[in-house]
Image (cartoon, grey):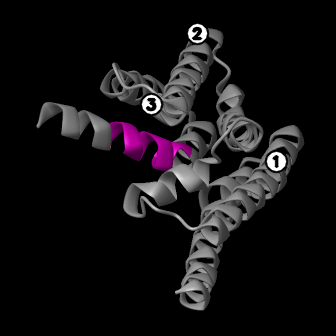
């Protein structure tokens, strides 16, 4: 029960990051959010302890990066450091997905095999293509996130990283699901 609560708190920290950053940067009296964010990321890291695999290592790295950025922001009294977390997320996910294309089984194929043990060759090709599409998404999203950091406008940063990027991810998930249904029907 405690581990589940910690996992939820960590997940909320990741999803709520852009809003908390916006609040902390827009309202200096809310800098109390920084230690709370750091704690959420440390708790997330604790819930991932003992888990293995590339995805778990990526999540551990992201939790560590979130904690480090939060703690560095507190220590240096420079909340602007917090803006870089979405860039880190996109770089880590690009490396994870891209590396999986080069070494054995792509990430999307691994996820597909959780529900379909005997994935047909067409399914394997499809999952490889979807992994490539996600790599392109991470390059695009990370580039725009980087641009919002460099511009330094917290409102544009928040608009992109707290809303537009999530909407684009949801759209990509939905489109992929629709295409997958069509592909499955064609090969059944």
Mark 2 lies on a secondary structure that is: helix
- From which residue to which does the magenta span run? 9-17
In this rendered view, identify the residue nearer to me: 155 or 145: 145
Nearest to the eye among marks 2 and 1: give it.
1
Whether residue 143 sits left or right of residue 166 in the image: it is right
Task: Determine whether 126 is above or below 16 in the image.
Answer: below
Determine crowd level at label 3: few under 14, some 14-19, many 20+ residues with C-alpha closer than 10 A: many
- Relative to 68, is 130 above or below? below
In this view, the residue in front, 110 or 121, is: 121
Mark 3 and mark 1 lie on one chain; the one further toward the N terminus is: 3
C-beta proximity under 8 Å, tags 3 and 1:
no
Counting residues from the start of the chain, the first of labels 2 and 1 encountered is 2
Q: Which residue is mark 1?
A: 148
Disc 2 residue crowd, few under 14, some 14–19, many 20+, Cα 10 Å: few
C-alpha distance separating marks 3 and 1: 21 Å
Percent of width and height locating residue 103: 71, 35
SS majority, magenta: helix
- Residue 33 is one of the magenta-drawn residues: no
Q: Position of residue 21 (x, y in %)?
A: 58, 40
Q: CA distance from mark 3 to mark 2?
A: 14 Å
Q: Nearer the viewer, residue 179 or 118?
A: 118
Crowdedness of circle 1 by 10 Å Cα count: few (<14), some, many (20+)?
many
Q: How many numbered tags mark residues here?
A: 3
The mark found on residue 75 in the picture is 2
Quadrant of residue 132 in the image?
bottom right
Residue at image location 76% in from the left, 42% down from the top: 98
């Amino acid at each position: 029960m405690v581990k589940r609560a910690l996992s939820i708190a960590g997940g909320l920290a990741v999803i709520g990051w852009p809003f908390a950053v916006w609040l902390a940067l827009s309202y200096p009296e809310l800098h109390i959010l920084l230690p709370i964010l750091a704690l959420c990321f440390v708790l997330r890291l604790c819930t991932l302890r003992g888990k293995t695999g590339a995805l778990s290592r990526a999540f551990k790295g992201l939790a560590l990066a979130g904690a480090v950025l939060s703690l560095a922001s507190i220590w240096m009294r420079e909340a602007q450091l917090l803006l870089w977390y979405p860039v880190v997320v996109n770089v880590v996910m690009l490396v994870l997905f891209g590396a999986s294309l080069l070494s054995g089984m792509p990430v999307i194929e691994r996820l597909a095999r959780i529900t379909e043990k005997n994935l047909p060759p067409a399914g394997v090709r499809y999952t490889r293509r979807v992994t490539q599409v996600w790599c392109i998404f991470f390059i695009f999203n990370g580039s725009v996130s980087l641009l919002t950091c460099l511009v330094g406008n917290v409102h544009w940063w928040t608009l992109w990283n707290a809303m537009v990027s999530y909407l684009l991810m949801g759209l990509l998930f939905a489109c992929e699901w629709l295409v997958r249904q069509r592909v499955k029907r064609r090969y059944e």
